[in-house]
Image (cartoon, helix red, strand yellow):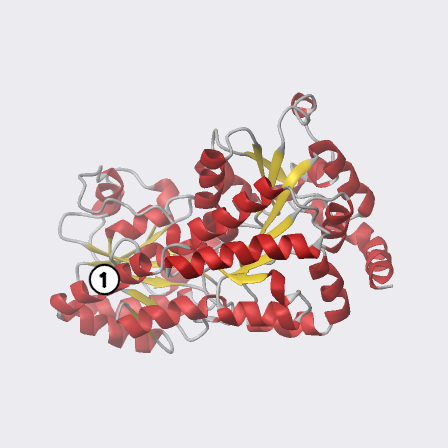
């Protein structure tokens, strides 16, 4: 009944969906794949190797999935790895970070005939869904074809959880198709169980984002990017993954700070780089000089006085954090829920964030409790916190060390997740045989308990 209603709604909405995809330039190129039409050059290869299909909706999910995909390549070299995304930024991340390891495809639109066509072509041995990106027809058809479905790094924000509760009967049917749910925290595990996932198929394995490759901070490295951004005595304050409504507060914060710390340079990295012109206007309105990264030449960084760099290129933010004296992570001054607080922490940088951290509650709490992160209510409050640590460099160093230690202390989700996937691939148990699947998961839980 719920699937019938869902598919009727999808059919009614299909003209609007296709119109939106055609209207957006960044979506047109991937439209054939979204409709199940793959390039001819891949047509002859689908049946030569068993496929592990990983779905990661966008940049954040791809970032979490990269270490797992690399580990699966090492553990299962005979399998072909395909990573699907919804967004263009997700595609770029896959092609940059998993080149030669996995192939990229856009996920098919959730029309039954499109999904069936793609599954028939790929014939996956396993489907991995990253962070609760659940599509009813995709899960249902995979399950009917006997394909194991593993939810990894699963999380449910408060907003998502409230929304899913309104469609709990559909969620219960969808989650019945999932072989196992590997969740980030006990809160997430409890929430997905409340939505209908069988409790014996739910495990708390931790957050994969803690297992991002650790940079060798003491290893000599090329400082070409830093030299492009800064003059010798300048220091960089990086505000990453920002949204509308945040840049204005950050600019006011910077104007306050630069009066006390004249060598401080603000770098704004908007979550959506298409907003660069809008940010440039906001910078100019406050009487500050703006320099776009895409237009930066060797002489541009020598611009004297307070200045704001706008990171309007993709794929550089994680590295730019390396050159920061301190970092603010966006999506937290506005009710977005927060982005990746660990990207600056892994570089041993103090992490500042706002009150809206629903998407990263556990990480924000860990950073705060360890002294590696501070929560500010708004831009004015952030200026106070920033000024305090910029005046006390020993406190700044301690804060950065504490932030990095949080990352180091919470690793292990990668191995736990990969071990479950390996057990399922090797066990070859029928996915509808709940008892067999439960035995596999129970054996793994026992191993985890022994290791503790």
Q: Of 231 and 134, which appears nearest the observer? A: 134
Q: Of 443 and 251, which appears nearest the observer? A: 443
Q: State whether residue 445 is above or below residue 41.
A: below
Q: State whether residue 59 is above or below residue 167.
A: above
How far across and how far down the image is residue 194, in percent?
64, 73
Observer able to see residue 353: no
Q: How many marks?
A: 1
- Specify the quadrant that holds the N terminus: bottom right
How far across and how far down the image is residue 279, in percent?
43, 58
How far across and how far down the image is residue 355, in percent?
42, 75
Is 8 on the left-hand or right-hand side of 207?
right
Identify the residue shown where x is 87% and y is 59%: 4
SS category of the residue bearing label 1: helix
Q: State whether residue 23 is above or below residue 399.
A: above
Is 142 on the left-hand or right-hand side of 426?
right
Is 10 on the left-hand or right-hand side of 313?
right
Observer able to see residue 322: yes
Q: Mark 1 points at which residue?
A: 400
Q: Of 364 and 234, which appears nearest the observer? A: 364
Residue count near mark 1 (Cα–Cα under 10 Å), binned few <14, some 14–19, many ≥20: many
- Specify the quadrant that holds the C terminus: bottom left
Is 157 on the left-hand or right-hand side of 370?
right
Identify the residue shown where x is 27% and y is 59%: 404
How far across and how far down the image is residue 293, in percent?
36, 45
Q: State whether residue 70 is above or below residue 137.
A: above
Identify the residue shown where x is 24% and y is 38%: 224
């Amino acid at each position: 009944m719920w699937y019938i209603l869902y598919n009727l709604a999808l059919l009614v909405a299909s003209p609007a969906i296709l119109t939106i995809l055609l209207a957006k330039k960044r979506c047109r190129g991937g439209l054939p794949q979204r409709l199940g039409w793959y390039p001819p050059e891949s047509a002859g290869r689908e049946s030569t190797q068993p496929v592990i299909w990983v779905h990661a909706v966008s940049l954040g999910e791809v970032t979490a999935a990269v270490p797992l995909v690399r580990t699966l390549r090492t553990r299962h070299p005979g399998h072909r790895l395909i990573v699907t995304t919804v967004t263009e930024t997700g595609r770029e991340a896959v092609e940059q970070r998993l080149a030669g390891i996995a192939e990229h495809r856009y996920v098919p639109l959730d029309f039954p005939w499109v999904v069936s066509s793609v599954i028939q072509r790929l014939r996956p041995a396993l489907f991995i869904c990253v962070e609760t990106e659940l599509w009813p027809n995709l899960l249902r058809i995979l399950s009917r074809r006997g394909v194991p479905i593993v939810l990894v790094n699963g999380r449910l924000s408060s907003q998502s959880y409230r929304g899913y509760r309104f469609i709990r009967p559909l969620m219960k049917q969808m989650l019945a198709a999932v072989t196992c749910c590997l969740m980030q925290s006990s809160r997430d595990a409890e929430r997905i169980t409340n939505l209908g996932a069988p409790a014996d198929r739910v495990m708390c394995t931790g957050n994969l984002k803690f297992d991002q490759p650790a940079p060798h901070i003491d290893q000599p490295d090329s400082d070409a990017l830093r030299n492009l951004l800064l003059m010798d005595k300048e220091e960089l304050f990086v505000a990453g993954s920002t949204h509308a409504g945040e840049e204005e507060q950050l600019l006011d914060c910077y104007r306050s700070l630069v009066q006390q710390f004249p060598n401080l340079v603000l770098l704004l990295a908007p979550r959506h780089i298409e907003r660069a012109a809008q940010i440039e206007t906001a910078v100019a309105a406050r009487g500050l000089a703006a320099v776009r990264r895409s237009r930066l030449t060797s002489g541009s960084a020598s611009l004297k006085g307070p200045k704001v760099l706008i990171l309007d290129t993709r794929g550089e933010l994680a590295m730019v954090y390396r050159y920061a004296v301190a970092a603010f992570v966006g999506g937290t001054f506005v009710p977005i829920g927060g982005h990746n607080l660990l990207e600056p922490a892994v570089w041993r940088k103090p992490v500042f964030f706002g009150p809206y951290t629903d998407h990263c509650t556990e990480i924000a709490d860990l950073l705060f409790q360890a002294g590696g992160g501070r929560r500010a209510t708004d831009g004015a409050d952030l200026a106070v916190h920033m000024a305090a640590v910029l005046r006390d460099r020993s406190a700044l160093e301690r804060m950065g060390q504490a932030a990095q230690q949080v990352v180091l202390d919470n690793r292990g989700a990668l191995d736990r997740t990969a071990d479950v996937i390996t057990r399922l691939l090797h066990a070859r148990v029928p996915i509808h045989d709940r008892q067999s699947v439960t035995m596999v998961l129970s054996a793994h839980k026992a191993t985890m308990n022994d290791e503790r």
